[in-house]
C-alpha cells in the first residue's frame, strides 16, 4: 500500500508485506510506547483487524496478532491495559471512513494461517543488552545470560544466602512476568524441567486463581524442580520482585520479551541443526537409483558376486 495513517500517539505505515508502527514521543504517550519506539508487524503475524468506537469522539483501529506471533504479548499474557496495547491506533471519529478503508486493505492481506497460532515468533523482540532496577536487585540481560545482583536493602535472606545469580538462556524453558501494576509483581525465570502455561501468581506457580495464574506441569525433572523451587517469588533466587517505581512496565516487559525470544530461539536451534545434519547425511534418491542400476549391470556381467551385490545394494538403500 505504501500509505501512512497518523493517529493519536502512533503512526502506521503500510508496506506490501507488513505494517510499520512508529510511536510518538511525548508526555501523554505511554512510556511503553516510547521504549518500543517502532515495531514492524508482518501481515503473516496477524489474525484479524477490527474497527470499533473509542472514547471521546474517537475510533480504534486494531490489528489482532496471532497467538504466539509476538514475544511482547506472549510475555504480557493478557496483563496490558488497553491504553498500552501497541496494536491499537486511536483516530478522531471523522477519520472513520479512512480507517475502514485501511482495515479492509489489511484484512485482504491476511495469510491462510491467520486463524492458527504461529509456530514461531514473527514480530521482532526488543534487542539486548537490557537492564532494569527491581525492588530487591538489578536485572541485566546481554542476549545470552540473565544476571541478578541483589540490593541489601530489599533482597530477602534467602536471596542473600544464594548470592548474585547468572542464568544462561540455554538452561531456561521460559519466563514469567507479573505486571508491576498488579499486586506483588515480579519477573521470574523458569528453569528447564518446569513448564508453565502462563505467569504464576505472587503466591507461587499454579496457586490462586486471579489474573496471571499459571498451571505448571513438569517434564522429566519435575518432582525435583518443584521441590527445589521456592513457592514465593521474593524467596526465589531466579526472580526479582517489583514495587512502587521498581520494574515499571516499560522496562521489565521488554526485558521479559527479549529473554523469552532468546530462550525459544536457543531451544529450536539444536533441532534445526540436527535436521540439517540429517538432511545432509542423506543421499539423493536419483543418485542411489543410478548406482544400484550400475551395480546390477556389474552383477549381470559376472563382475560382482551375488553376496557382494546384495550387501552393496543394502548399503546404498540404507543411505536413503
Image (cartoon, rainbow, N blue to C red):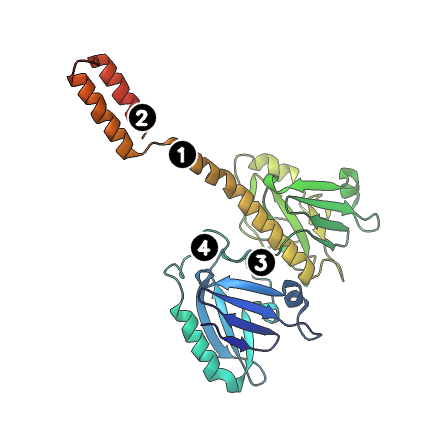
Q: Earlier in the sequence, mark 3 or mark 4?
A: 3
Q: Are marks 1 and 4 in contact (CB under 8 Å)?
A: no
Residue located beneath label 4 in the image = 118
Q: Earlier in the sequence, mark 3 or mark 1?
A: 3
Q: Determine crowd level at label 1: few under 14, some 14-19, many 20+ residues with C-alpha closer than 10 A.
A: few
How many angstroms separate mark 3 from mark 2 (CA)?
Answer: 46 Å
Q: Furthest-right residue in view?
A: 153
Residue 67 visible in image:
yes
Would you say 306 lies left or right of 57 here?
Answer: left
Q: Quadrant of the N terminus?
A: bottom left
Residue 206 visible in image:
no
Residue located beneath label 3 in the image = 72
How many angstroms separate mark 3 from mark 1 (CA)?
Answer: 35 Å
Would you say 189 lies left or right of 301 here?
Answer: right
Residue located beneath label 1 in the image = 280
Q: Nearer the viewer, residue 222 or 16?
A: 16
Q: Determine crowd level at label 2: few under 14, some 14-19, many 20+ residues with C-alpha closer than 10 A.
A: few
Residue 147: % across, % down? 71, 45
- Is disc 3 placed on a helix, strand or loop? helix
Would you say 95 lies left or right of 246 here?
Answer: left
Q: Residue at x 47, y 60 (%)?
A: 45
Q: Residue at x 53, y 42 (%)?
A: 267
Amino acid at each position: 500500500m505504501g500509505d501512512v495513517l497518523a493517529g493519536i500517539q502512533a503512526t502506521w505505515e503500510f508496506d506490501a508485506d507488513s505494517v510499520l508502527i512508529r510511536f510518538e514521543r511525548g508526555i501523554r504517550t505511554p512510556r511503553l510506547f516510547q521504549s518500543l519506539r517502532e515495531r514492524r508487524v508482518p501481515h503473516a503475524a496477524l489474525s484479524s483487524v477490527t474497527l470499533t468506537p473509542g472514547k471521546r469522539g474517537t475510533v480504534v483501529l486494531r490489528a489482532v496478532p496471532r497467538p504466539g506471533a509476538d514475544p511482547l504479548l506472549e510475555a504480557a499474557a493478557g496483563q496490558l491495559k488497553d491504553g498500552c496495547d501497541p496494536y491499537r491506533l486511536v483516530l478522531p471519529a471523522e477519520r472513520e471512513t479512512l480507517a475502514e478503508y485501511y482495515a479492509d486493505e489489511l484484512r485482504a492481506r491476511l495469510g491462510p494461517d491467520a486463524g492458527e497460532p504461529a509456530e514461531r515468533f514473527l514480530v521482532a523482540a526488543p534487542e539486548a543488552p537490557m537492564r532494569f532496577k527491581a525492588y530487591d536487585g538489578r536485572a541485566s540481560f546481554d542476549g545470552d545470560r540473565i544476571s541478578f545482583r541483589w540490593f541489601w536493602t530489599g533482597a530477602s535472606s534467602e536471596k542473600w544466602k544464594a548470592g548474585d545469580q547468572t542464568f544462561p538462556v540455554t538452561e531456561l524453558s521460559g519466563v514469567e512476568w507479573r505486571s508491576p501494576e498488579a499486586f506483588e509483581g515480579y519477573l521470574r525465570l523458569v528453569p528447564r524441567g518446569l513448564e508453565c502455561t502462563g505467569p504464576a501468581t505472587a503466591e507461587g506457580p499454579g496457586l490462586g486463581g486471579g489474573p496471571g495464574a499459571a498451571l505448571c506441569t513438569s517434564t522429566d525433572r519435575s518432582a525435583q524442580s518443584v521441590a527445589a523451587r521456592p513457592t514465593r517469588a521474593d524467596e526465589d533466587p531466579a526472580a526479582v520482585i517489583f514495587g512502587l517505581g521498581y520494574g515499571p512496565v516499560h522496562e521489565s516487559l521488554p526485558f521479559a520479551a527479549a529473554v523469552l525470544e532468546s530462550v525459544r530461539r536457543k531451544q529450536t536451534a539444536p533441532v534445526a541443526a540436527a535436521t540439517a545434519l540429517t538432511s545432509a547425511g542423506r543421499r539423493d534418491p536419483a543418485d542411489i537409483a543410478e548406482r544400484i542400476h550400475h551395480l546390477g549391470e556389474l552383477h549381470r556381467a559376472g563382475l560382482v558376486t551375488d553376496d557382494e551385490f546384495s550387501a552393496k545394494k543394502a548399503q546404498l538403500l540404507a543411505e536413503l
